[in-house]
Amino acid sequence: MEFNPRNKILAQIEPATALRARGRLERVALHARTVLQEPGNLVEWVWFPDDALICVASETVGGESVSGGMIGWNGAYGAFEACGSRQSFTRAVVQISGQAWRIRSQHYREIFEQSAGLRAAVHKHMEALMVEARQLVACSAIHPVESRMCRVLLDASARSHGGDELSLTQASLANILGVQRTTIAVTASALQRRGMILTGRGRMELLDRRRIQETCCSCRETIAFAETEIFRSHAQVCEG
């Protein structure tokens, strides 16, 4: 199997380590709405999307769920838990179909020990996720739903296949943004009337990226700048 990942984390594995891991890394097709991980279960796989998009959701004891982030080619799911508690406290659901790589947790830990490049990439990914999580707390409190929705649409496209047609439902957008579905319906209708998007059954099409970008909140730019700075840093990450 040829190992040529688009995934930003996997691409940092040294060639010699990648060669040894070749028989343990599997390239798989992920389909929308597939549940990869349930909260409370052991983490058996670590997932590295190439052009699929995984949404990570947190649940309350009452069963309510809100998405806590979108993971595409720029990240991984299970990479922290597999080296920590081995247990998941979130649900991982495929939002946009596509290709990904997966590896069993025990084999991932072996590669993690062997590859300094992988350890550095995972460390930087974790730092970037922390920056994003903190920024989105402020975003939810300050920015209107319309600008936040535009941010999510652009992020979903950029972190998956990069196309204009996205398999995003109003229910999934409501979950990602933490608002009522009726709010998403009103917001999507307003954007569609202005010719920015086209909504359909289970999909959203980006018609005018320039205007979507202009409407998008500034948090997207802030997060992108931080992620770029983190990943281009040559500082040695702490491993001890």
Image: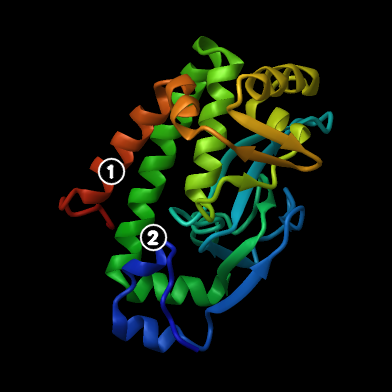
* Residue 172 at least partly seen: no
- Position of residue 8 relative to residue 93, above or below, is below
Amino acid, disc 1: Thr
Q: Secondary structure at mark 2?
A: loop
Please give the name of the residue rendered at 47% of the width and 71% of the height, measured from the top-left corner.
Answer: 109
- Position of residue 216 relative to residue 83, above or below, is above
Image-quadrant location for residue 82:
bottom right
Please give the name of the residue rendered at 47% of the width and 23% of the height, measured from the top-left corner.
Answer: 216
Q: Is residue 176 left or right of residue 64?
A: left
Of residues 54 and 167, the one nearer the viewer is 167
Q: CA distance from mark 2 to mark 1?
A: 12 Å
Please give the name of the residue rendered at 35% of the width and 52% of the height, measured from the top-left corner.
Answer: 123
Where residue 215 appears, as percent x and y from the top left, is: 48, 20
Q: Quadrant of the C terminus?
A: bottom left
Q: Check disc 1 and report the residue beneath it.
A: 228
Q: Secondary structure at mark 1?
A: helix
Q: Check disc 2 and report the residue beneath it.
A: 8
Please give the name of the residue rendered at 74% of the width and 52% of the height, measured from the top-left corner.
Answer: 38
Image-quadrant location for residue 206:
top right
First of labels 2, 1 by sequence position: 2
* Residue 216 at least partly seen: yes
**Mark 2 Cα shell of 10 Å, populated few (<14), some (14-19), many (≥20):** many
**Mark 1 Cα shell of 10 Å, populated few (<14), some (14-19), many (≥20):** few
Amino acid, disc 2: Lys
Where residue 68 appears, as percent x and y from the top left, is: 60, 36
Q: Is residue 188 left or right of residue 64?
A: left
